[in-house]
Image: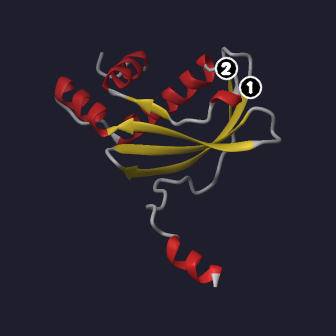
Amino acid sequence: MSWWRGLFSRGTQEPLRAAPAVRRQKNYSAASGYAYEYFYEGFRDEGGCRCHVFTVSADRKEWFELHVLVEDRAIESWRAKHSRPLAENERYAVAKMALFEAFDTWSGPGEMLAPVRVDAHAAERLLERLGIDV
């Protein structure tokens, strides 16, 4: 009977969108000394945020999901300040830069239990670093 309950409990979460047709493993050598490998899995909009999902490993043995939550308010604040919306690739760039910043600042993968949150201040800083509408 547990399979019956499982049948109806699934699907409560929106499926991921913009997942790459072919998963590409990427690498990042962090300032923390770790060399991370990661895959981008896609995103979903949930609770006032766009949740970008990455699968990450620091040792190729243990993999875990890391969520980067870019607040809708952050994107709206940026749009109001710069008089244009962010393109989809620019929204993804915010999430990826936040991921790299987490890799650089956290002492190791053990600290990566909570999602990375991007508020308006962080989004502005990350986009400025990328040279978008400076």
Give the residue drawn at x 75%, y 32%.
Answer: 58
Is disc 1 placed on a helix, strand or loop? strand
Quadrant of the rendering where the C terminus is positioned = top left
Q: Nearer the viewer, residue 132 or 114?
A: 114
**Colouring of the image:** secondary structure
Q: Position of residue 27 (x, y in %)?
A: 69, 31
Q: Is residue 128 above or below residue 99?
A: above
Give the residue drawn at x 61%, y 36%.
Answer: 113
Give the residue drawn at x 74%, y 25%.
Answer: 35
How many other residues sit within 10 Å of disc 2, few (<14), some (14-19) or many (≥20)? some
How many other residues sit within 10 Å of disc 1, few (<14), some (14-19) or many (≥20)? some
The residue labelled by disc 1 is 35
For residue 95, the mark is none
Q: Quadrant of residue 126?
A: top left
In the rendered image, the residue lying farthest to the front is: 1
Q: Is residue 1 above or below residue 67?
A: below
Q: Amino acid at mark 2?
A: Ala
- Lateral position of residue 40 relative to residue 81, left or right: right
The residue labelled by disc 2 is 30
Could you tell me if the residues under marks 1 and 2 are in contact, i.e. CB atoms within 8 Å? yes
Q: Is residue 67 above or below residue 132?
A: below
Q: Position of residue 46 (x, y in %)?
A: 38, 51
Quadrant of the rendering where the N terminus is positioned = bottom right
Q: Nearer the viewer, residue 26 or 78?
A: 78
- Lateral position of residue 129 relative to residue 64, left or right: left
Q: Position of residue 85 (x, y in %)?
A: 24, 36
Q: Position of residue 73 (x, y in %)?
A: 27, 35
Q: Amino acid at mark 1?
A: Ala
Q: Nearer the viewer, residue 88 or 125?
A: 125
Give the residue drawn at x 50%, y 27%.
Answer: 97
Mark closest to the chain's N terminus, 1 or 2? 2
Is disc 2 placed on a helix, strand or loop? loop
